[in-house]
Image (cartoon, helix red, strand yellow):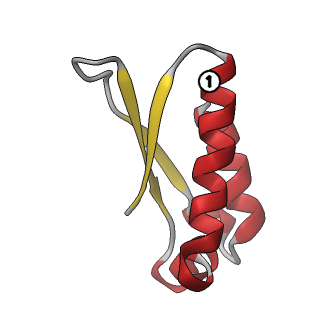
Amino acid sequence: MKELLDTLARGLVNEPNEVNVVEDAPTEDGTIVYHLHVAPDDMGRVIGKQGRIAKAIRVVMRAVATRNDQKIMVEID
């Protein structure tokens, strides 16, 4: 899952070396939180107009997690 998020983000940004994904330990209800860090200049590219790209990233990640019987959350920091 972490690799998928990393690959998605690297495809969107101008500075792929600045992309960093941090995975938190599962919470009480089993939800795993992924924190996506990108360069400040690339934040707009990852979020998109009105948050559409960020929403699409979350939808794709949630769909993959559902197939693996997992709960996840993606936060863009």
| Point 62% across, 24% down: residue | 66
Which residue sits furthest top? 69
Residue at 70% over, 59% down: 10
**Number of numbered callouts drawn:** 1
Q: Mark 1: which amino acid?
A: Thr
Q: Residue furthest right?
A: 11
The vertical placement of 68 against 65, above or below, is above
Quadrant showing the C terminus = bottom left
Image quadrant where residue 3 sits: top right
Which one is nearer the viewer's eye here, 3 or 46? 46
19 vs 52: above or below = above
Residue 59 is situated, as x and y percent measured from the top left of the image, at 63, 48
Is the residue marked by circle 1 packed among few (<14), some (14-19), or many (20+) residues within 10 Å? Answer: few
Residue that badge 1 annotates: 66
In the rendered image, the quadrant that contains the N terminus is top right
Residue 13 x %, y %:
68, 72
Q: Position of residue 62 (x, y in %)?
A: 59, 37
Q: Which residue lies at the image location 52% right of the left edge and 19% below the top edge?
A: 70
In the image, 71: left or right of 56? left
Which residue, as the protein is rendered here, is positioned at the far left?
28
Q: Is residue 64 left or right of 35 when viewed as pictured?
A: right
Using the image as rendered, state which of residue 32 and residue 22 is in the foreground.
32
Q: Position of residue 69 (x, y in %)?
A: 57, 13
Q: Is residue 28 above or below residue 62?
A: above
Looking at the rendered structure, the secondary structure element under dot 1 is: helix
Q: Residue at x 50, y 74 (%)?
A: 39
User: Within the image, what quadrant is residue 29 found in?
Assistant: top left
